[in-house]
Image: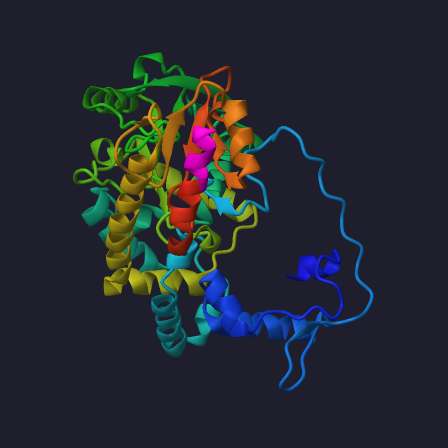
Amino acid sequence: MRRAIRESRLAPGTALPSTRALAADLGIARGTVTRVYGDLTAEGYLRTSQGAPTRVAAGPRPSAEPREKSGPPTSAWFRDARWDLFPGRPDLSSFPRTAWASAMRRVLQSLPAGSFDYGDPAGPAVLREALARYLARSRGVLADPDRIVVCGGYSHAISVLGHLFDEIAFEDPSLPEFRDGAAKGGAKIVTVPVDERGIRVSELDSPVAVVTAAHQYPLGVTLAPERRSALACWAAAGGLVIEDDYDGEFRFDRQPVGALQSLAPERIIYAGGVSKTLAPSLRIGWLVLPRRLVGPTLDTMTALGWRAPVIDHLALADLLNSGVYDRHVRQRRVAYRRRRDRLIAALPPGFVPEGISAGLHLVLRVPDEAAVLRALRARSVAVDYLSRYWTGTGPGGLVIGYATPAEHAFGPAVEALVDGLRA
């Protein structure tokens, strides 16, 4: 609304909908609209008077920044997409606000003054203890609190590890942002092909390898049992594995496959976080490290200026210890499974998803990636495109984040997606 006023799409004197009408139209709380109207009035964008509609205020407007010219998209995501199916995020409207606020209130009521100081760079002991219990019961991870280092999400973790190792192998395809993050840390990046059975372990020729064993990103396959064993043997023989378990809690057709880390805990680094279960903005992730790497990892994090957000960490520990976090994950697992089933049922003939029934995204191979992206962009649908994940030339396709929209927007988003695919 602020942008529309600045760009004169809402002219001075324009009457705005009532808070009740706009809240109903957008499917959000009336209190949210009331608060926004109040903020915009305080900023001078709106004017109100008793018994009259809220109107756009008169006055000078900052000049709008020029918009990018339209053309073939260089990225499938765009800021003003009406239907956001870009992968990598949960349904942010499902964030457990009440539970988080209650946890924060309990933490602040009992917190000694010293806890507001710079905390342990590894994270508060109470959180590391809670994580050790949670990871053991949910993912089969062998961990004790002294081997857990809490970090600022996986992007932070992989950049720190990029400072520790001279060379790191990534799966091909894999998320380019993570390869870039490790490279900026100083590591040389090489890639190893992935097929329908996961990473080709026999082609590993680097000291360190990053794998998404439970649910390969983006292809969606799981690492085959014989390759899990082969990878553990490779690690035991001197290699080091970084296991990115980004959505391991969300397996829909069976019990989740346990973490690879339990096969060789002194040769496998386990990485997890709350970006897919709660929200990316919390920036909370963790590494379960071989003992010999705990000190070097903490030294590197400290040298790079890391300071842990202690209060948020303590709130997460409260959710873990109370069982609220487990309940939230179970609820989201049911919701995302339903969404995946609805999306697959709606796909036009000829579009068959790849990968296992898990996670927050699915992959569709398409014969003309650029044409499909243009059709979706014309319908204001944002998805990701598969070709950008390969380091060389690879098949095109769509990577669709079915978890991303709020519940009320999911149905219309799928309809817009299907309309674009049919076109």
Applied colour scheme: rainbow
Considering every residue shown, the one lying at the far top of the view is: 203
Quarter assignment of residue 243: top left
The magenta region covers 416-423
Q: Looking at the figure, which quarter contains the N terminus?
A: bottom right
Q: Position of residue 109 (x, y in %)?
A: 38, 78
Dominant SS of magenta comes to helix
Residue at left 43%, top 62%? 312
Would you say residue 249 is visible in this rendering?
Answer: no
Q: Where is residue 26 in the image (x, y as percent from the top left)?
A: 49, 61
Q: Please give left or right for residue 239 compared with residue 59 in the image.
A: left
* 421, 31: nearer the viewer: 421
Q: Where is residue 75 in the image (x, y as percent from the top left)?
A: 57, 33
Residue at left 68%, top 73%? 55
Q: Where is residue 203 in the image (x, y as percent from the top left)?
A: 35, 12
Residue 331 lies, with reference to residue 380, above or below; the image says: below
Magenta stretch holds residue 419: yes
* 220, 342: nearer the viewer: 342
Residue 242 lies, with reference to residue 407, above or below; the image says: above
Would you say residue 254 is visible in this rendering?
Answer: yes
